[in-house]
Amino acid sequence: MSSAAAASREARVATPSASSGGPGTPGTPGAAGALRVPGMSGVSASSGAGGGPGAGGASGVSAIAERAEAVRRFNRFYTRRIGVLEEGLLRSEFSLTEARVLWELAHRDGLAPSDLSRGLGLDAGYVSRILQSFARRSLVSRAASAVDRRRSVLSLTARGRRAFGVLDRRSRDEATAMLRGLPPASQDRMLRSMADIETILGERGAPATAWLLRSGRPGDIGWIVQRHAELYAEEHGFDRSFETFVADIAARFLRHFDARREQCFIAERDGERVGSVVLAAHSQTVGQLRLLLVDPAARGLGIGRRLVEECIGFARRAGYRKLVLWTNSILVPARRLYEQAGFTLAREERHRSFGRDLAGQYWELPLTRTRNARSA
């Protein structure tokens, strides 16, 4: 069964993932008609004669050339709109690429330089020069991997985390300001369009299955209780006492909600809720991931993984030193997600609950870095 949280910004995504997590688990826009692109004089973006890359003849060449120009025009507009043309990103000393490397180091543990190069599609020499610059400024540290002592892994120093924190706040503030200038319907439309672009360009040939991630709204917690009760009865044979259990968790979360340290995240697809996670305060220094769930119709899209990542990211920003969660051993897909995110099993105990004999599991994830790293 899960334990709680996720970030307060709105996000969008599409990729592969697991099944429902649980209260304690922790747990195509197809081509329907032609899409008109502004400034393309009647050229449709749907597949068909004269439209695709394989289309022959002058009309095919003309169509793809116009589409390429439309892409370039959008790129010029958007790069100017989000301020990446400035010498220093977000009024900082960092370039766009340097800021992205900082982001990776802040959100992923145990990265080696080769991981950065491969994951970001950057030349290894370029990444090495960036890391050398960071080392001179005491922004990164390097240590031997606990798994393979021959492998060197990177982490941000305290100074590096402060530098990233400034960038992260400014980026969040700018994105928030842009969204606040739009009515809610336009915000949702924009996020869905961004998710479409990410899906289409991210996985070539894969069906476009766009979804978005947002923070909680009135009515979301009620849906979480209902969907948990329905799914756990259908998939695991849990009785009605499980619904009471989830409702109690939800009621405590709402009654004692602290926006600075707690959050609910909802995944939506085509305007429908398809996933959830909650981060609740377990103590002053420990956060709890709870109520992780992905609807069966939306599994395999990376939603569960993204919900867990958002929860961890929010917990770091909120200042928690550790994340914990409770789940049951039968929830195998959710347990895999936790392992992939870096959680480790602390203990397991048998119990009789929800009409079944179960093995409860307590998982935890330290959010503080080791202090014995040597300078890079």
Image (cartoon, helix red, strand yellow):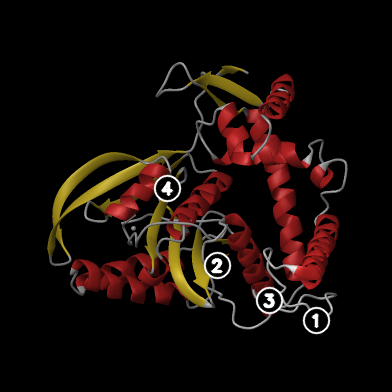
Residue occupying the far bottom of the picture = 33
- For marks 4 and 1, the one nearer the N-term is 1
Left or right for 101, reference 89: left
Q: Which residue is mark 2?
A: 208
Q: Which residue is mark 4?
A: 283
CA separation, marks 2 and 1?
24 Å
CA separation, marks 4 and 1?
60 Å
- For marks 3 and 2, the one nearer the N-term is 3
Q: Residues within 10 Å of mark 3 (few under 14, many from 20)?
A: few
**Helix or strand or loop: what does disc 1 sit on?**
loop
Dot 4 and dot 2 residues touching (CB under 8 Å): no
Decide if residue 37 is in sight here. yes
Disc 2 marks a residue whose amino acid type is Ala
**Helix or strand or loop: what does disc 4 sit on?**
loop
Comparing marks 3 and 2, which lies closer to the viewer? Answer: 3
Residue occupying the far front of the picture = 57
Q: Which residue is mark 3?
A: 49
Q: Which residue is mark 1?
A: 42
Residue 263 position, x and y percent, is 51, 60
**Quadrant of res 51:** bottom right
Residue 264 position, x and y percent, is 49, 63
Residue 274 position, x and y percent, is 44, 71
- For marks 3 and 4, the one nearer the N-term is 3
Q: Is residue 44 above or below residue 86?
A: below
Disc 1 marks a residue whose amino acid type is Gly
**Quadrant of res 1:** bottom left
CA separation, marks 3 and 4?
62 Å
